[in-house]
Image (cartoon, helix red, strand yellow):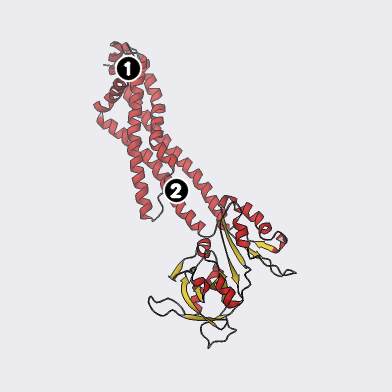
Amino acid sequence: MSRLAPLDLLGLGLIGLRTRPARAALSGLGIAIGIATMIVVTGIPASSQAALLARLSALGTNTLQVMALPDTQPPASLPETAVEMVRRIGPVSAGSAVANTHAFVRRNDRTDPHDGSGLTVLAARLDLPSVINARVRSGRWLTTATERFPAVVLGSVAATRLGVTDLPAGGPAPQVMIADRRFTVVGILATTPLTPDIDRSVLVGWPAAKSELAFDGHPTVLYVQSDESQIEAVRGVLAETVSPERPGAVLVTRPSDALAAKRATESSFSVLFLALAGVALVVGGIGVANTMVVSVLERRSEIGLRRALGATRGQIRSQFLTESVILATAGGVAGTSLGLLATVGYAAWQDWPVVIPAQSALFGVGGAIVIGVLAGVYPCVRAARLTPTRALATV
């Protein structure tokens, strides 16, 4: 007998599914549940991991601080071009700075001029909020216009201590006194967990600090963001980059402890994903293999009749292998769709970012096909080994 055409082979593979729809549906459901489980048990933890990593990143896992070492002789200071020098380091993605003006701030001119309420007046660069993940709670951040004039943004603690809890829209802006000069409050920051010192600070534009507060232009603290995978390497060269002449007089903070926690979390979740996906695929494969073995036992008379009419062993093997692949593929498509819907729904309910590992989506259908092939090998070989007389003897 000539070799079967692909369409004829497909038709033969569908025979068992059409003649026993209930069994085929239940078997397909079992595969679908296994694949859906694989998608869910990888997609939901991945979404949870993404939410957790985002929270850890907000704690400064990619941020370093650079400052001059105190109590050195002669006194150390950071160069005025420190930020530009740091930005030339390859893995560095952003850099900004603040500088202590050593001025006192007070609510009005009737308070003690030397009572600064424990607050620090800092000169700040315009790009500071994006580097330290700061958010303006009320009003606005400094602009290219306001940074040159007596305008300030208050940290959350500074706003409370100075009695400026909010900025009324359309009303007169409150003012504070800095070095006997009135500065208009244009914004109030929300709490910044990454840099609590900013919460207790009054932030003035860099040019205004020079013109109004006799600021010398040397930054006090640099904030540096870099690629997390290169954070240790960047830390190793920061001191020499900022102060080639006196690198020992530069203090660089170590990476946040949250970075170690983040890396441990990524590693643990990766192992979990692989383990859960493997279990789900094994369960699905066993279900397909069991279904196909039972199918061979039930259809021995059909196999014997086809062999008696001239079907070769290769055609019998192809028929049952095709049926196994069709059954697994249908279950894989249904399971993948069900798993994706369940993952998206749960992530949306928990307000997590939706993250579905690419390997899980690919394994949903591709893995089901592989399962169908592997699970169908033994049943199709067993069916092909049945002789016509032995198979027909069961009729």
In the image, residue 392 above or below residue 91: above
Residue pointed to by mark 2 = 46
Q: Could you tell me residue 104's position as x and y percent? A: 58, 80
State the residue lying farthest toward the right. Answer: 73
Q: Which is more toward the observer, 280 or 113?
A: 113
Amino acid identity at mark 2: Ala
Q: Nearer the viewer, mark 1 or mark 2?
A: 1
- Pointer 2: residues within 10 angstroms few (<14), some, or many (20+)? many
Q: Could you tell me residue 222's position as x and y percent? A: 60, 63
For residue 246, side relative to residue 60 (left or right): right
For residue 229, side relative to residue 135 (left or right): right
Amino acid identity at mark 1: Leu
Q: Which mark is residue 4?
A: 1
Say which element carries label 1.
Answer: loop
Is residue 393 something one can see in this rendering? no
Residue at 29 percent of width and 20 percent of height = 8
